[in-house]
Image (cartoon, rainbow, N blue to C red):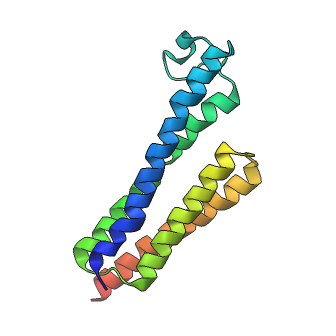
Amino acid sequence: MKQDLIFLPIGALAIWTFVVLLFVPFRRIGAVKRGLVRPVDFKFGESATVPGEVSIPNRNYMNLLEIPVLFYVVGLVFHASGKVDIVVLTLSWLYVVIRLVHSAIHLGHNNVLHRLAAFTASNIILLVLWVLFFVRYFAA
């Protein structure tokens, strides 16, 4: 299998992260224009006066910069070791899709149980990718 295919799901998640980043200023500027908050409310991040619908995009953006870093790393180590195959590629795309679902839930109806299910599923897939890497790498 062409090893560079792993960069497609990696790139897709990176692009999605930038898309979510765009939500942050739009929600903040909109809230300031509507008089819900003042610019000073964002001086040190987000103050307690910032409504949830304004702070959620920033929180989701931070989520996309936390545990997904391990996804980027595992994709790179699979590529560097030449161990990308259809299983790895399928799991990687599944991880990305579930992270997109997580974001859609978080930025949309924000049902905590739905969000938790997506978060948990994505982390299980990420764990499987890491275990698979170590099993394959050290079994060779």
Q: Quadrant of the C terminus?
A: bottom left
Q: Is residue 75 above or below residue 51?
A: below
Which residue is outermost to the bottom?
A: 140
Q: Is residue 10 above or below residue 107?
A: below
Q: Return the x and y of residue 77 as percentages of the image width and height.
A: 29, 69
Instruction: Depth check: give the residue in front, 128 or 22.
Output: 22
Q: Is residue 114 above or below residue 135?
A: above
Q: Return the x and y of residue 4 as percentages of the image width and height.
A: 28, 73
Q: Return the x and y of residue 129 as percentages of the image width and height.
A: 44, 73
* Residue 65 visible within the image: no
In this rendering, position of residue 75 left or right of residue 30? left
Q: Return the x and y of residue 67 as percentages of the image width and height.
A: 47, 53
Name the quadrant containing residue 3.
bottom left
Instruction: Depth check: give the residue in front, 34 or 134.
Output: 34
Residue at the (52%, 46%) spot, across then down: 63
Q: Is residue 27 above or below residue 121?
A: above
Q: Quadrant of the N terminus?
A: bottom left
* Residue 98 visible within the image: yes
In this rendering, position of residue 17 left or right of residue 23? left
Q: How many marks?
A: 0
Instruction: Depth check: give the residue in front, 126 or 25.
Output: 25
Residue at the (23%, 72%) spot, across then down: 80
